[in-house]
Image (tube, rainbow, N blue to C red):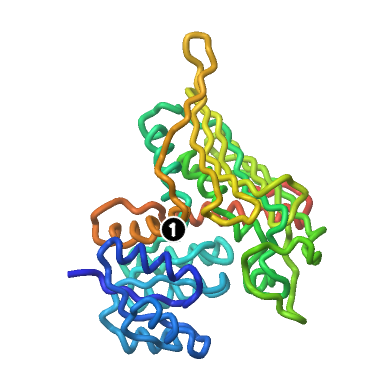
Amino acid sequence: MSIKAGVIGAGGMLQYHAAGFRQAGAEIVAVADAAPGAAAKAAEKWSIAKAYESVDAMLAGSPEIEAVSIIVPNKFHAPLTIQCLEAGKHVFSEKPPAMNAAEVQAIIDAAKKAGKQVLFNFNNRARPESQAMMTYIGQGAVGKINSAQAKWIRRTGIPGFGGWFTTKDMSGGGPLIDLLHMVDLAMYFMGYPEPAHVLGQTFSDFIQDKQFKGPWGIPDRVGGTTDVENAAHGFVTFKTGQVLTLQVSWAEMVKREEVSVVFQGTKAGGKVERLFGIDGLDNTAIDTCELYVQENGHSVNRSITTPACEDMGRIGSAANFIEAIEGKTAALNTPEQALRLMQVIDAIYASAASGKPVSI
């Protein structure tokens, strides 16, 4: 029998969750959204049988649901994840995992008590380039990754002014917590080591400047709050001796949007990169995957060819959730990894606030 799934949130990411769940053989039986009429509209568009205007109503009205995906503003990720776990459901949540590391620990505790799985939509792990690179890493071709550089930078990418993205109480922060994917991917390649010390700085010079609004996001909210950073830089040392440099921005004086992880291993270096076109849309992006080695006294750069993936792994990530809870494949991520990621993010914000390094 197929897994019965419910979705909380009728936003744009529903298309990928629905496609991934169905690709893996799951049946989406219900959708819930607090905005009047939003769930009903999404149910009709995506052929979902039942629509609800509250999570409580969905859990009560569709008890057959075994798994739930969560597509809501960041503030509600942890509370809804815990509520669904306590209701006996597996959970697939959008990123970030929560507002901070303490909330992730509460999720871990709830998942253990419920005996259910929690996965997060770190979809860039499911990109073909990332999986190809992980194959080389797993085979030992790279050796130990000593250092890595994670970057997701935008020149004009503020996702609206005054909305939940730019309201710290709702989002937890700006691009550092929103565009955390490359930090996660770098730590994934590195074996997700335990962080030790963090030095970080954030910048807010352009966060009120309408010239830096991006081509995506939500409409501006007049009178709303805009109190997050527009860029963050950091340096992380791990207990293994590995180090990570990161640069993340919605608005920064750079040439173009760049999404990349570069690393230096004891046997080979490498890069996974996505360069966007001028309009910033996925179908204009160019993906690359490369390895750098020394052979017979020569520097050799190997280009790894992978299938095109316009959705940046979003469908594959959702499908992995269903297959993982069915025991058909290994989960692409774990709550314990999410905890380490959020510890790093918390520490960068704390370091930026204090002007001092932070020990974890």
Q: Image height check: is 16 above or below 357?
A: below
The residue lying at 49 percent from left, 56 percent from top is: 338
x, y percent for residue 51? 38, 86
Q: Nearer the viewer, residue 333 or 36?
A: 36
Query: Is 154 placed left or right of 111 in the picture?
Result: right
* Residue highlighted by disc 1: 314
**Quadrant location, the N terminus:** bottom left
x, y percent for residue 221? 71, 79
Amino acid type, callout 1: Arg
Query: Is 200 placed left or right of 70 in the picture?
Result: right
The residue lying at 58 percent from left, 33 percent from top is: 147
* Residue 57, picture quadrant: bottom left
Looking at this rendering, what residue extends furthest in the top direction? 297
Q: Image height check: is 323 above or below 224?
A: above
x, y percent for residue 70? 45, 72
Q: Image height check: is 170 above or below 345?
A: below
Q: Image height check: is 261 above or below 330?
A: above
Query: Is 325 placed left or right of 160 in the picture?
Result: left
